[in-house]
Every structure is written in structure tokens, then in C-alpha cells.
């Protein structure tokens, strides 16, 4: 087993399934936890760890994809898929940073229901700063999550087209239909 092939198969086709599942899952967790900090507290450290695992799998999958690309010939659909795939890493970094920030903000909110604002010493910023931070975190979580999920969809769609374009018979074999 290596990072380029597993059990005789190109590793990319296996790793991609983790990315396709983990990016939307991490995005959903980030948004839910940003909107409802109590979920961030419940998830605890697993939220940024999920973001970190997702982030780590993106370059591993891309590396395995580059290895596979060098072995499938010069196909414009494969080139397009590879170009789109190279664009996922910034989204994965953003998703990790969002999960880290949402986790940190969730920790700042006391378990007893007191808001993080009550721990801020300045009376003038007691309510606005934490509310603004939470609102900013929620907006960032939605934007980064949506961008990451859309990018994964676009990459997956191009990969499916590259893999299956004219590579199957539209009529089932063994049938008279």
C-alpha cells in the first residue's frame, strides 16, 4: 500500500470518496456549530479535528490524482478535472480555519448559558463584540462551506465525466432491448 496505489488500484479513486464525504460533512458541522454554539461545545475538539483530517486528505488525494493523471494519457477532460482539483486546497484550508475559529468561540461561551460577552471587561463592547464575532463566524462558515461544497461538486462532476465519457455501452449486454 502506498499513497499512489492500494491493493492494485489507483489510490485516487479510493481517497476521493473520503474527500467527497468529509468536505460536505465538515462544512455542515461548521455551519451548524457556528449558528448554534452549544453544538460546538458538544462536538468539542472533534470539530477542528474533523477540519484537520479533511484538510490533510485533500493534498493526499491530489497527489494520488497527479500520479494517476500521468498514467492515463493526455485527455482534456482529465486535465480539466486536475485543474479544478488543484483549487480545493484553499477551500479546505479555509474550512479548517473556520472549524478552528468556531470551536474556539464555542469554548468562549460558558456552559451555564452566560454569553462570552459577560467576560469582556469593557461595558461598551459587552454585547456587540461577541455578537459580532459570532455573526462573523456564522457568515464565514456559510461562505467557506458553500464554496468548498460547490467546488467538490464541480471537481467530482468533471472527474465523473473524465472517467465515464464514452467508456460504457448505453445498451445493457445480454438483453434484446
Image (cartoon, rainbow, N blue to C red):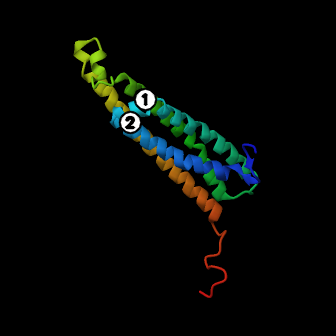
Pointer 1 local density, CA inside 10 Å: few below 14, some 14–19, many at least 20: many
For the residues labelled 2 and 1, the Cα–Cα distance comes to 8 Å
Pointer 2 local density, CA inside 10 Å: few below 14, some 14–19, many at least 20: many
Which quadrant would the C terminus be assigned to in this image? bottom right
Examine the rendered structure and indicate whether residue 88 appears above or below residue 171: above
Looking at the image, which residue sits at the far left? Answer: 124
- In the picture, measured across the screen, residue 152 lies left or right of residue 34, that is right
For the point 60% across and 61% down, the residue is: 161
Q: Position of residue 57 (x, y in %)?
A: 61, 40
- In the picture, measured across the screen, residue 153 lies left or right of residue 40, that is right
Q: Quadrant of residue 118?
A: top left
Q: Position of residue 88 (x, y in %)?
A: 56, 43
Examine the rendered structure and indicate whether residue 172 appears above or below residue 14: below
Which quadrant would the N terminus be assigned to in this image? top right
Element carrying mark 2? helix
Number of the label disc, if any, that sits on residue 33: 2
Tag 1 or tag 2, which sits nearer the N-term? 2
Kindly indicate whether the residue at mark 1 contacts the one at mark 2 (C-beta within 8 angstroms).
yes
Examine the rendered structure and indicate whether residue 141 appears above or below residue 70: above
Return the residue nearer the eye: 27 or 94. 27
Number of the label disc, if any, that sits on residue 30: none
Query: What residue sits right under mark 1 in the picture?
Result: 103
For the point 67% across and 50% down, the residue is: 12
Return the residue nearer the eye: 151 or 97. 97
Looking at the image, which residue sits at the far bottom? Answer: 176
Q: Position of residue 19 (x, y in %)?
A: 57, 46
Q: Position of residue 133 (x, y in %)?
A: 34, 26
Amino acid at each position: 500500500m502506498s499513497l499512489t496505489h492500494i491493493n492494485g488500484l489507483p489510490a485516487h479513486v479510493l481517497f476521493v470518496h473520503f474527500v467527497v464525504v468529509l468536505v460536505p460533512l465538515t462544512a455542515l458541522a461548521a455551519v451548524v456549530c457556528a449558528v448554534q454554539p452549544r453544538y460546538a461545545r458538544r462536538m468539542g475538539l472533534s470539530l477542528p479535528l474533523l477540519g484537520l483530517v479533511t484538510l490533510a486528505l485533500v493534498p493526499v488525494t491530489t497527489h494520488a490524482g497527479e500520479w494517476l493523471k500521468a498514467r492515463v494519457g493526455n485527455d482534456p477532460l482529465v486535465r480539466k478535472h486536475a485543474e479544478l482539483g488543484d483549487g480545493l486546497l484553499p477551500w479546505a484550508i479555509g474550512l479548517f480555519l473556520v472549524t478552528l475559529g468556531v470551536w474556539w468561540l464555542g469554548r468562549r461561551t460558558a456552559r451555564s448559558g452566560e454569553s462570552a460577552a459577560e467576560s469582556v471587561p469593557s461595558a461598551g463592547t459587552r454585547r456587540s463584540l461577541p455578537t459580532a464575532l459570532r455573526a462573523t463566524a456564522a457568515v464565514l462558515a456559510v461562505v467557506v462551506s458553500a464554496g468548498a461544497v460547490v467546488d467538490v461538486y464541480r471537481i467530482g462532476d468533471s472527474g465523473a465525466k473524465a472517467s465515464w465519457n464514452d467508456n460504457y455501452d448505453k445498451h445493457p449486454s445480454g438483453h434484446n432491448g
